[in-house]
Each structure stands twice: as C-alpha cells, then as structure tokens.
Image: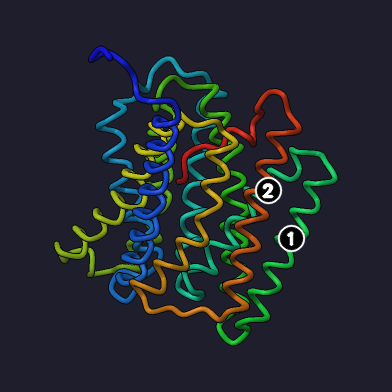
Amino acid sequence: MSAAAGPAPGTAGVGAVGLVAIGLICQQVGSSAAIMLFPEVGPLGMVMLRLVFSTLILLVIARPTLRGHSPRAWRSALMLGGVLALMNSFYYLALRELPLGVTVTIEVLGPLALAVVAARTRTSWVWAGLALVGIVALGGGGWDRLTLAGVLFALGAAASWAGYILSSARVGRDFDRLDGLALAMAFGALLSLPFGIADAGGALLRIELVALGAAVAVLSSTIPYALELVALRRLTPAVFGILMSLGPALACVAGFVLLGQRLSLLEIAGVALVVVASAGAVWAGRVERAEPDLVADVPPTP
C-alpha cells in the first residue's frame, strides 16, 4: 500500500464520530464549569464572558469584512446575534434552577420539534410522543427539583435553539465562510454586556474569574465548533443529528461526576426516552427526504 493511500473504509466515519463525542464532552464540561462560577459572576455574567471570548476568538479566525454585505445579510446576522444572546441567557438561567441533565433534555426539544415538523410523517409524531413521555417521566421522577422558572427558562432555550438553526441557515446563505457567524456573535456579545456587567459586578475585576470565563468559552464553543466542522465533512447530516441527541445523556454524566447531581431511575428513563426520540426523529427525516433540507443540516452546537 502506498503512503498516499487513505484510511480504511469506515475509519474516517469512526474518527468523525469520535470528534463529535469529544466536542459534546467538552461542551458539558464547560457547562459544569460555568455552573461552578455562578456564585461569583451569576448566570448572565457567565453568558457575557462566554460570548465575549467566543467572539474574540472567532474574529481572529474569521477576520470578517464589514463591507459588501447586503441589507438582508445584515438583518440575518443581527437576528442570529439576538437569538444567540437569548439562547445562552435562557440556558444558563435554567442551569441555575435545574440539574444539568434535565436542562439539556428539555432544551433538545427545540431541534426535535423542527425535525418532527420537517419529516411530515406519521412516524415522526410517534417520536414526538415518545419525547413527551420522556419529559413527563422527568417531572414524575423529581418534581421537588423542578421549578416553574427553571422549566420556562429551559423551554425558552429550546425555542431559541430552534431559532438558531433557522437563523444560522439564513446567515450561511447570505455570507461567505464564517463572516456572518462572527458578526452575529459580536452583536450577541454586545447585547449581553449590560446584563452581564450588572450581574457580575466587581467580580469582573478578578483576573482568575475572567480567565475561567475564557476557559468556559473555549470548552463550550470554540473546541466543539471546530471539531464538529471537521466531523461534518465526513458524516451525513442525519448521522450528525443523531449524535447530537446524545447531549442529554452526556449532560447527566457530567452533572453526576462534576457537580454531584443525582437523578432518579425515572428521570434517567425520561432522559433516555428523549435521546431515543431525538435520534428517531432525525433518522425518520433522513428516510423521508431524498435530499437533506434546512432542518436536516443541523449546524454545530452553539
């Protein structure tokens, strides 16, 4: 075999799956670290730190130009930036109220709903029903740990994630390379500044806390995004979407190992049902459509 020969059949796919898994693990470790910082900087302060440092890194990588963009493109970028700020804010506010695994499980209902609507099959509604059963199991297994505010914040994050998928698809059409995402991230960071400064206060003057905020940005955004971009070159959108469905399970593991958050057996069953429903809905959409569409092409996690 020559030195130029490529990897054995299937090796690239296995490697891409590993990249996605590492990205998901980094994301949940980042979320766990963010929760540990809540007493110091608050959830909205954490949102600001994550978005600001993610923006700085992305601006260095993308080096976007401010010229030559149409008004429609600017509207798309501003809309995506607003959605990013909302999604991260709802997510971290939910994490203050709910266990990590429960929050991520509810949040994934946003992409799941889009996948179900896009599939337009009876089977897709079966997956939606299975997800609903999972959510009921989550509640039945730990009503004492669920708060109304936490559930509403998590549902807000779910709706925002669905909006992120739709908005990022528009930005991808209106901009070249990563220019649109970089500009959108910068706008989202600007929106988060007043709320983050008010929430974190004097903690922003502590270098060690700011450095930890930068680490959370790298773990939660930079590393997962980079790994997922590489993986998407080797995986079909449907397979990638199914792998994303593992997020709630990994969040439960991270919450247990890093934060000491225990789930009851019924709650674990609820998470498992949502994971299966998410994967099934994505797979149903793949079977239904000869060509992947807007929802099937799930973008990297925010």
* 89 over 68 or under it: above or below: below
Q: Which residue is mark 2?
A: 280
In the displayed structure, does residue 299 sit left or right of residue 193? Answer: right
The residue drawn where x is 44% and y is 19% is 176
Q: Secondary structure at mark 1?
A: helix
The residue sitting at the left extreme is 207
Judge whether 169 appears above or below 251 on screen.
above
Colour treatment of the image: rainbow
Name the kind of residue labelled 2 in the image.
Gly
Q: Which x, y percent locates residue 7?
A: 35, 24
Q: Which residue is mark 1?
A: 130
Label drawn at residue 90 = none
Name the residue located 25 percent from the left edge and 12 percent from the top edge: 2
Q: Does the CB distance between marks 1 and 2 fall below 8 Å? A: yes
Q: How busy is the neighbourhood of tag 1: few (under 14 within 10 Å), some, or many (20 plus)?
A: many
Question: N-terminal of the two: label 1 or label 2?
Answer: 1
Q: Note whether residue 193 is visible.
A: no
Is residue 4 or residue 174 the one in the foreground? 4
